Amino acid sequence: MSISIWHWVILLLLLAAPLLFLRYRVPEGPNRFGPPAAPAGFVEAVKRFFANYVNFRDRASRSEFWYAMLFYVVLFFLVGFLRLPDIFATILYLVLFLPLLSISARRLHDSNRSGWLQLVAFFTPIGTIIAIIWFSRPPSEDHLPSDNC
């Protein structure tokens, strides 16, 4: 039994990935993720969801995050209800995966947490419950404009 080059590449990536976390530095200061995010209605939240496709630096309000999640869930419910081909659902998932990660990171920034903490949701079921609690938290007191006085 021989190990192919792809197995070695995957193994190397798995071993090297934790090193990337060692280089990550959390911004310092009371307003490290930018100004507080403005609340949004459903349509505005969906617009921001797509407009901030790869924005992993700013913040997202609770209403923006939860309306975007509602849009995401309803969209996949419709795909299942209309019995569209699986390839359509797969393409839709791939297109929406990056903005989903982006808005989750921005929501965690609003509660003064690193966007990397959304990875805890992959440890089901406890990690998912913890992530939902973090996503539901109000903006951190560290970031309120009154602290900048």
Image: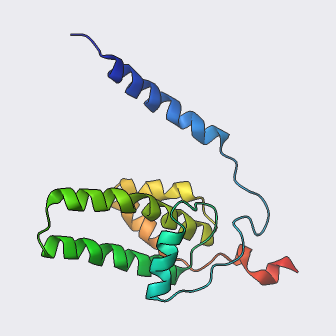
Q: Position of residue 59 (x, y in %)?
A: 61, 71
Which quadrant, please, contains the C terminus? bottom right
In the displayed structure, 149 sits above or below 59; it is below
**Residue sitting at 29 percent across and 14 percent down?**
3
Q: Nearer the viewer, residue 53 or 35?
A: 53
Q: How is the image coloured?
A: rainbow
Estimate the x, y position of residue 35 in percent, counting from the top left: 72, 75
> Looking at the image, can residue 137 be seen?
yes
Residue drawn at (50%, 64%) of the image: 53
Q: Which of 123 and 62 lies nearest the eye of the viewer?
A: 62
> Residue placed farthest to the left in the image?
83
| Residue pictured at 73% horizontal, 64% vertical | 32
Q: Is residue 111 visible?
A: no
Image-based side of 63 in relation to 37, left or right: left
User: How many numbered badges does the structure rendering display?
Assistant: 0
Q: Residue furthest top?
A: 1
Question: x%, y% of residue 28?
Answer: 77, 58
Classify 42 as above or below 143.
below
Q: Position of residue 49 (x, y in %)?
A: 48, 72
Residue 58 shown left or right of residue 53 in the figure = right
Residue 148 lies left or right of residue 18; in this view the side is: right
19 is higher (above) or lower (below) than 67: above
Q: Name the image quarter holding residue 7.
A: top left
Q: Residue at x 63, y 79 (%)?
A: 37
Q: Residue furthest bottom?
A: 41
Q: Quadrant of the N terminus?
A: top left
Place residue 82 in its image quadrant: bottom left
